[in-house]
Image (cartoon, helix red, strand yellow):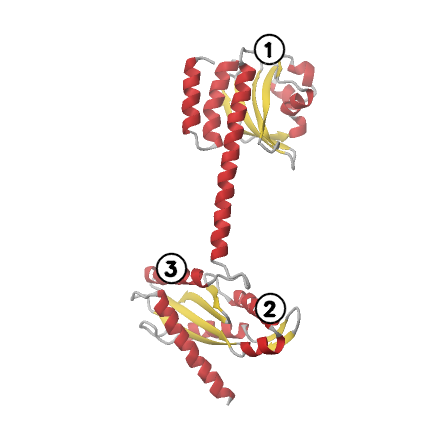
């Protein structure tokens, strides 16, 4: 490999941050080294048996198309691997039964597999020509070097994706109540503040409902905490089903839940009583917590939750913690009303 190519290789390796960004200049260099008219990088999906052209460099009449797929069993690359061949200038004699060889009129092939460190086949790095061309000096050395570089970049990308996925899972776990699968208090405070800001931007009222399960302690005392946990999970599932598009519900902790939604209101002013739309929404949430619950270890008739709902006008700045406190106060007023009604 001459000095110019070495300099280009050093620059490419030093600046590339994706497999594609690395592969494209490498394919140009591979064409310069081999003298073959098309160089390309493929991926191989072993489970579906599909090979795909990921990156292509065409320097002659042969025009390969990126994204093109073919069955791995019909690929010259697979035949070369099976036969232990890395270079052939008599392709029709070797693999003339392959449709792609006949269609493209291939005469010369050189290539090498790309494996990850665990031995998995990622794809192939290849060069082809419609002319019978001699094997260029150092072409196999260059192919092997480029394949290793691409394999390392593939693993780096995979590691980055795995780390990002792990971070997303950790972030999701940190914002999720493990018992019910609902967002937890942390996620509630963030989302509530976001929805308050959204209400201001859209000039929409924000409804906040604070739910506290009446008689939940008695369930734990009479049936045990396992049944209590099952009831919490079942109520959470019903609350999900009662939500409108764009609504949000979270488990605040213990037997307390909070729902937030956007919508019109009859009354104006910060922290005003809910209008008809919010009252209907609040009733739907309350009804979702009532009735018969067929749990894994028991069947319960549950009286449901006391629901305190407030409506927030869009023309004021609200603090999420203060909003939650006012909704909590509305819930306690509702709880007193229910207790008095029971007599």
User: At 49% from the left edge and 36% from the top edge, which residue is drawn?
Assistant: 157
Q: In the depicted view, which residue is nearer to us: 262 or 103?
A: 262
In the rendered image of this protein, does residue 135 appear above or below residue 248?
Answer: above
Name the residue nearer the viewer: 242 or 308: 308
The mark nearer the N terminus, 2 or 3, is: 3
In the image, taking residue 279 as reference, residue 80 lies left or right, namely right
Residue 128 horizontal side relative to residue 11, left or right: right
**Residue placed under numbered mark 3 in the picture:** 194
Determine the secondary structure under disc 1: loop
In this rendering, the label closer to the viewer, 1 or 3: 3
State how far apart marks 2 and 3 are (Cα).
31 Å
In the rendered image, which residue does mark 2 sit on? Answer: 230
Question: Who's the residue at 48% across and 74% down the image?
Answer: 212
Residue 164 pos. (x, y %): 48, 44
Residue at numbered disc 1: 132
Mark toward the start of the polypeptide (1 vs 3): 1
């Amino acid at each position: 490999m001459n000095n110019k190519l070495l300099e280009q290789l050093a620059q490419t390796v030093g600046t590339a941050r994706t497999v594609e960004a690395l592969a494209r200049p490498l394919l140009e260099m591979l064409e310069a080294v081999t003298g073959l008219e098309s160089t390309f990088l493929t991926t191989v999906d072993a489970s579906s048996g599909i090979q795909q052209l990921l990156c292509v460099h065409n320097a002659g009449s042969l025009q390969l198309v990126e994204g093109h797929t073919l069955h791995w069993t019909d690929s010259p690359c697979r035949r070369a691997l099976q036969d232990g061949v890395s270079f052939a200038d008599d392709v029709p004699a070797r693999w003339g039964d392959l449709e792609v060889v006949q269609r493209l009129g291939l005469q010369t092939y050189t290539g090498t597999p790309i494996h990850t460190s665990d031995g998995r086949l990622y794809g192939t790095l290849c060069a082809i020509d419609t002319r019978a061309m001699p094997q260029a000096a150092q072409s196999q050395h260059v192919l092997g070097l480029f394949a290793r570089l691409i394999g390392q970049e593939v693993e780096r990308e995979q590691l980055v994706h795995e780390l990002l996925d792990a971070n997303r899972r950790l972030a999701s776990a940190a914002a999720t109540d493990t018992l019910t699968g609902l967002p937890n208090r942390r996620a509630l405070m963030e989302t509530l503040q976001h929805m308050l800001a959204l209400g201001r931007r859209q000039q929409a009222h924000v409804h906040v409902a604070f739910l506290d399960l009446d008689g939940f302690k008695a369930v734990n005392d009479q049936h045990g905490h396992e049944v209590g946990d099952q009831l919490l999970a079942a109520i959470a599932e019903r609350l999900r089903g009662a939500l409108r598009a764009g609504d949000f519900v979270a488990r605040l902790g213990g037997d307390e839940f909070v729902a937030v939604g956007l919508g019109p209101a009859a009354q104006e002013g910060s922290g005003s009583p809910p209008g008809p739309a919010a009252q209907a929404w609040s009733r739907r949430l309350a009804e979702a917590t009532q009735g018969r619950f067929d749990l894994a270890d028991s069947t319960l008739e549950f009286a449901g939750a006391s629901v305190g709902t407030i409506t927030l006008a869009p023309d004021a700045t609200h603090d999420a913690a203060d909003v939650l406190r006012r909704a909590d106060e509305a819930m306690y007023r509702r709880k007193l009303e229910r207790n008095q009604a029971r007599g």
